Every structure is written in structure tokens, then in C-alpha cells.
Image (cartoon, grey):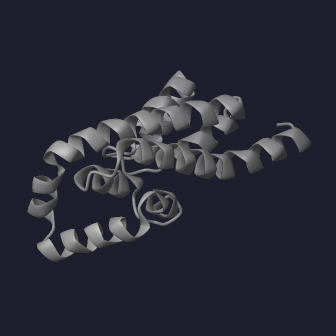
Amino acid sequence: MDFVAVGMDLVSTYGLLAIFLIGFSEPIFQPIPTEVFMVGGLALGLDWRYVILVSTLGSTLGGILTYFIASKYGEALFLKIFNQEKYSSAEEFLTKWGPLGIIVISFTPIPFEVICWLSGIFKMPFKIYVSALIISRIIKHGLVVLPFAALGSIFPF
């Protein structure tokens, strides 16, 4: 199944709602970064300000849900999939980097949901987690969308 094609079909049909839902699903389980669909939405003529707003809101709410699921069930699930060494390594990373780790992971090839799950598993203080989540999404989504918005104002399509 081609997730990108399905996602782009959703964006072309439902616009901002689809970007919100894709953003919501990314921190939970969705393997394709929301930014792919944000750019597609811009190409379809969606307003860049609303694209940043709904993607950030969706991703933040999805990250909050992920945090609560992971805080309750994440440790057992993590240890079924990975070994104790990986668990310790993840805990060490989160202890060392804390909320800055959320922002750093946003700019790596590591799927965003990994840091969201780890934050819940290791029970990062909730307000700090949400603040880092919002900051990471605004920065990343802004860095993706703003160049396209600038180009669109110079070269209207």
C-alpha cells in the first residue's frame, strides 16, 4: 500500500482536515512525516498559515495521546520489541537530553513517534513534554512551509 498516495488523496479531498488527522496520527504510529503532506497541501493551494496551525495542533494532540498510552503500556511493549540494552540506551538519551531531545529528534531520520513514546514510557514531566512538543512542531513545520510560502509570494502559481 502506498501511504503517500493515500495521504495525498486525503489531502486533495479533505484539505486541512486531512493534514490535521495525518499530523495527529504521526506521533502515534504513522510512518510518513506530516511535512510531506503539508507540502502537498501547499501545492494544492492551501493557506500556509492554516497548514502550520492544523499540522502543529494535530501533531501536538497526537503526541499527548501517545504520551498517555506509552506511560501506561509503553514499557511492556518496548521490552517485547527491543531488548533491555536498547531500553537502557533510550532512557539514557532521554535523561541526558530531556525536552531538548524532542526538538533534536525532530530533525533526524528517527521517526518522531519514537521520542513521543519514550517520553511517555519514562514519564517526562507532562507540561515540559507538551511545551517541547509544540516548539519542535512549530520549528520543523515552519522550516518546511515558510520557504514554499515565500516562493509562492514571489512566483504565484
Residue 78 visible (yes or no): yes
- For the C terminus, which image quadrant? top right
Q: Is residue 112 above or below residue 156?
A: below
Residue 69's spot in the image, x, y percent? 22, 40
Q: Which residue corresponds to the image point at 13% horizontal and 72% vertical from the top-left?
A: 84
Q: Is residue 89 above or below residue 118?
A: below
Q: Which residue corresponds to the image point at 68% horizontal and 45% vertical from the top-left?
A: 145
Q: Is residue 133 above or below residue 87?
A: above
Quadrant housing residue 138:
top right
Quadrant housing residue 89:
bottom left
Q: Relative to the observer, which residue lies in front, 91 or 29? A: 91
Residue 155 visible (yes or no): no
Tally of numbered tags? 0
Residue 140's spot in the image, x, y percent? 59, 52
Q: Which residue corresponds to the image point at 41% horizontal and 54% vertical from the top-left?
A: 112
Residue 111's spot in the image, x, y percent? 39, 58
